[in-house]
Image (cartoon, rainbow, N blue to C red):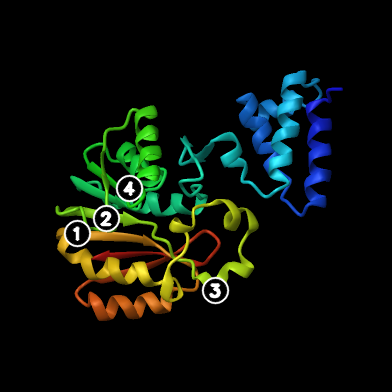
Amino acid sequence: MSKTYAEALKWASLLLTEHHVDPDGARYVMMNRANWTPSQLILHRQDVMPDASWQQFQADVARLAKFEPAQYITGVAPFFGAIFKVTPAVLIPRFETEELVDWVAKEQTAARTGLDLGTGSGAIGITLARQLPQVTMTLSDVSEAALAVAEQNAQSQHVQAQFVTSDLFSHLPGRFDFVVTNLPYIAPEETPVMDQSTLRYEPKLALFADHHGLALFERFIEALPAHLNDHGAAYLEFGYRQQPALQKLFAEKVPQAQVTFRQDMAGHPRMAKLQF
């Protein structure tokens, strides 16, 4: 027997809480399946769900109870006012990364070429292509499956960009006015304290790096100067405990760069800019 949307959400909340899963995922899948805004969900709370919708919702909640991310269940995730396709081949875009994109977009208004290195779903590079229409954006990733998702997102958002399969800079011989990247930075030893949905379902290739999460930063910094135009800049996201190690790395490898660190909205140091 079908329930009202409000009853269905209450049922899902109780079940997911029992499984130690955040019940907000149920609201997310319900709104996305119905193509509703939060206000529309409130308006329809007392409506009886169609049988097919109730059956779908029960199936979705069963997947949520196994810690599967709601974004993978529905196949979409919001980022910077747009909806991006996501699959288990790509990380789910985080709201915190919007701050990095906003920083780049506000500063790079005179740029003509930009690189989103390790693009995943394309959230960073595609958003910057929209925000900076004068910039020719290149989006690269070592994963061909991830790059295919990014290309689909660019097509659906009518964004022009270049796509290159590359392990860091290995197949990117050119130079750019700016580079932006959200490299894997989680140390393997951090798995015991990680969110279960991330650990079980998101691609490990995009999450983990050796040497306490610094291995890819080390490779990136070594190659970066050869891939930036004069007076170019690089923007990075990193783990909130990594600033001291990165500060030392930057000073050793690129002492000519002017380094600026920024905190996220929660007050954690999470972003850096290297100006050459």
Q: Residues within 10 Å of mark 4 (few under 14, many from 20)?
A: some
Residue ID at (63%, 68%): 193
- The N terminus appears in which quarter of the rendering? top right
Q: In this figure, which residue is indicated by the disc labeled 4?
A: 105
Residue 35 found in image quarter: top right
Q: Nearer the viewer, residue 150 or 263?
A: 150
2 vs 1, front mark? 2
Q: In this figure, which residue is indicated by the disc labeled 2?
A: 179
Q: Nearer the viewer, residue 60 or 272?
A: 60
Task: Tell me if residue 122 can be seen.
Answer: no
Give me the disc on residue 232: 1
Name above or below for residue 179 compared with residue 63.
below
Amino acid residing under circle 2? Val
Q: Nearer the viewer, residue 11 or 262?
A: 11
User: Upstream in the sequence, badge 1 or badge 4?
Assistant: 4
Amino acid residing under circle 4? Ala
Residue 173 in the figure: left or right of residue 161: left
Amino acid residing under circle 3? Glu
Residue ID at (53%, 65%): 267
Q: Nearer the viewer, residue 143 or 158?
A: 143
CB within 8 Å, label 2 to label 3? no
Residue 196 found in image quarter: bottom right
Q: Residues within 10 Å of mark 1 (few under 14, many from 20)?
A: many
User: Upstream in the sequence, badge 3 or badge 4?
Assistant: 4
Total marks shown come to 4
User: Upstream in the sequence, badge 2 or badge 1?
Assistant: 2
Q: In this figure, which residue is indicated by the disc labeled 3?
A: 189
Q: Residues within 10 Å of mark 3 (few under 14, many from 20)?
A: few
Q: Position of residue 164 (x, y in %)?
A: 25, 45
Mark 1 to mark 3 CA distance (whole Å): 35 Å
